[in-house]
Image (tube, rainbow, N blue to C red):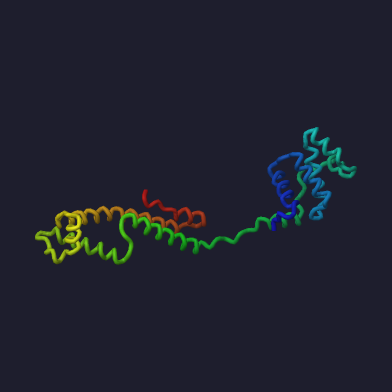
Amino acid sequence: MYSIENSYHPMMEALHAAMAAGTIHRSMAATAWWLGRQQIMNEREYWFQVAGRVTSLLPAADRDAIVAQLGKQEDTYVDSPVSAWPPLPSGLASLFASWDPILPAPDLAVLRADAIRKIDWEAEKYRENFITPGSGQVMAYQQKLAEARAAVTDPPAPTSEIPHIVAEAAIDGVTVATKAAEIIATFEQWQTVSAGIEARRLGAKKAVAEATTAEAIASAAIVNYGA
């Protein structure tokens, strides 16, 4: 486990990140010498090889400042530095690997099911911009449409058979024919909107079903119903 209590964990991580990036800096040398002197992970030789190589590649002023603080045995790592970074010891490799464990592969079936629920839920929420939710309300819409169509037939249905239209016409102060035409026009507009929502919803669900990665599933579940 990566520990913030052990100061040498971030020190080792920063040092190796700089090595991987091809960086040479005096802070790297100082870190490597300290790790070697402390015999961190029992890898004194490894740290000194790294330290010697970094020190040997420093600008003269930085190199001389560090060499002045080294012992005779440490000097040899600078005088005869390794030509490339030494192989990472197995103990260090295992420690570094434990900091970034491999996560289990995502369950795509679960992700697909979640994505489909999201698509359906968002489609329903978008529909609420145009219609009132609820099964009872849907039945009322259907009844009003049927009555509106009956009201504009020739001859029109008697008022006793179109109570919803008669009531709304009275509330709005318009004729039954006007209210019926309004309801029919609204329904026809809704059909266009609904078809667009349904096309996007079904298209997104198809894309989710065909997606082969977690990222692709998440991307397919993003639907702009208002586009």
Q: Quadrant of residue 186?
A: bottom left
On the picture, is 169 further left or further right than 118?
left
Residue 69 at what x, y percent from top left?
86, 40
Q: Position of residue 2 (x, y in %)?
A: 69, 56
Choose between 185 and 195: the one closer to the eye: 185
Residue at x 72%, y 44% (from the top left corner): 19
Nearer to us in this view, 102 or 27: 27
Residue 121, above or below 45: below
Is 26 placed left or right of 217 in the picture?
A: right
In x, y percent, where is residue 109? Answer: 49, 63
Whole-percent x, y for residue 79 in the image: 85, 39
Tally the numbered discs: 0
Please identify the residue farthest to the right as the structure is shown: 72
Left of 89 or right of it: where is 75?
A: right
Rendered-image quadrant of the N terminus: bottom right
Q: Which residue lies at the image location 76% right of the left edge and 43% below the top edge?
A: 84
The residue lying at 65 percent from left, 58 percent from top is: 101
Residue extending farthest left: 155
Task: Determine which quarter of the picture holds residue 139.
Answer: bottom left
On the picture, is 89 further left or further right than 208? right
Q: Is residue 86 above or below residue 95?
A: above
